[in-house]
Image (cartoon, rainbow, N blue to C red):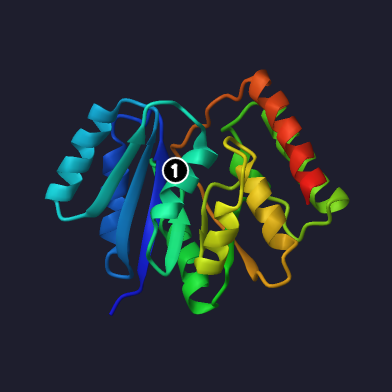
Amino acid sequence: MLPRADIVLPCYQPPANWWSALLSFHSYISSHYTIHYIVVNDGGDTKLVQKAITELTAQGLSIELHSYSKNRGKGHALRTGVALSKAPVTLYTDIDFPFTNESTKAVLDQVVTEQADVVAGFRNQSYYAGTISPFRRLLSKTFRGFLTNVLKLPMADTQCGLKAFNDNGRKRFLATTIDRYLFDFEFIYSACRDKHCLLLTTEVTLKPDIVFRKMKLKILLQESFNLVRVLIRN
């Protein structure tokens, strides 16, 4: 019997062909895992997403959709989906599956075979070459330095959007409170400080055609506040 896993996919304004990436991934992973997909529509157009879900269900995929009217942020959407997960392993990634199929499977494998509570993908610095602005590269480099040199975390990349966990890790994730970008940091920082939580990392690879969205200054300032709040609370 194949191991079971739930994959949580948050979305707000997904690309028009997002379902094709899901089908491609499912074709690859279905010989290794029994997968159930949980799509959380974070205040976007429900009709468009529902149409794709109906078509995917007709093609035999196990998939469900949960929607709410107000955009709350990726962290909130993921907590909504993770709370619904019932499989022994839960993974989350973006709805357009930006990482290679092999990378996603590698993250799942480490939870199953090495009994890790949390497995976090990490990206080599070359990951950003040609995909983001010089300012955002500088911001990423500075944040990575802060994580390893100031906070002394065992990993430099908390923000990679590919993570998986067992039930212990799931409880840790559901305890996060940040709704937007730094929910990943809050999750990993909390896991690193828990001596009963086994955290492992694996290097992952981005697909060549993925383009990052721009981050507004207002959001950067808000996330700076969230960072301070997490550090004070922990």
Locate residue 207: give its quadrant.
top left
Residue 31 located left or right of residue 89: left
The quadrant holding residue 154 is bottom right
* In-front residue for pair 163/139: 163
Where residue 161 appears, as percent x and y from the top left, is 54, 47
Which residue bears the numbered disc 1?
94
Task: Name the spot of residue 46 as percent of width and height, x first.
Answer: 28, 29
Along the line of sight, which residue is nearer the eye, 87 or 203? Answer: 87
The relative height of residue 191 versus residue 129 in the rendered view (above or below) is below
Q: In the rendering, at what x and y percent does residue 55 appear? A: 15, 42
In the image as oriented, which residue stretches furthest toward the left? 58
Q: Number of callouts in the render?
A: 1
The quarter of the image holding the N terminus is: bottom left
The picture quadrant where one finds residue 169 is: bottom right
Q: Secondary structure at mark 1?
A: loop
The image shows residue 5, relative to residue 73, as above or below, that is below
The answer to which of 42 and 101 lies nearer the viewer is: 42
- Furthest toward the right, the residue is 150
User: In this view of the protein, which residue sits in the foreground, 64 or 162?
Assistant: 64
Residue at the (57%, 37%) spot, across then down: 179
Query: In the shown orientation, is residue 114 left or right of residue 210?
Result: right
Q: What residue lies at 83% left-to-right and 52% top-to-bottom?
A: 151
User: Dot 1: few (<14), some (14–19), or many (≥20) neighbours within 10 Å?
Assistant: some
Q: At label 1, which amino acid type do we have?
A: Asp
Q: Position of residue 39 (x, y in %)?
A: 34, 44
Specify whether residue 166 is in view.
no
Residue drawn at x 72%, y 24% is 221
The answer to whether any part of residue 106 appears in the image is: yes
Instruction: Give me the residue at 27% from left, 64% from top.
Output: 30
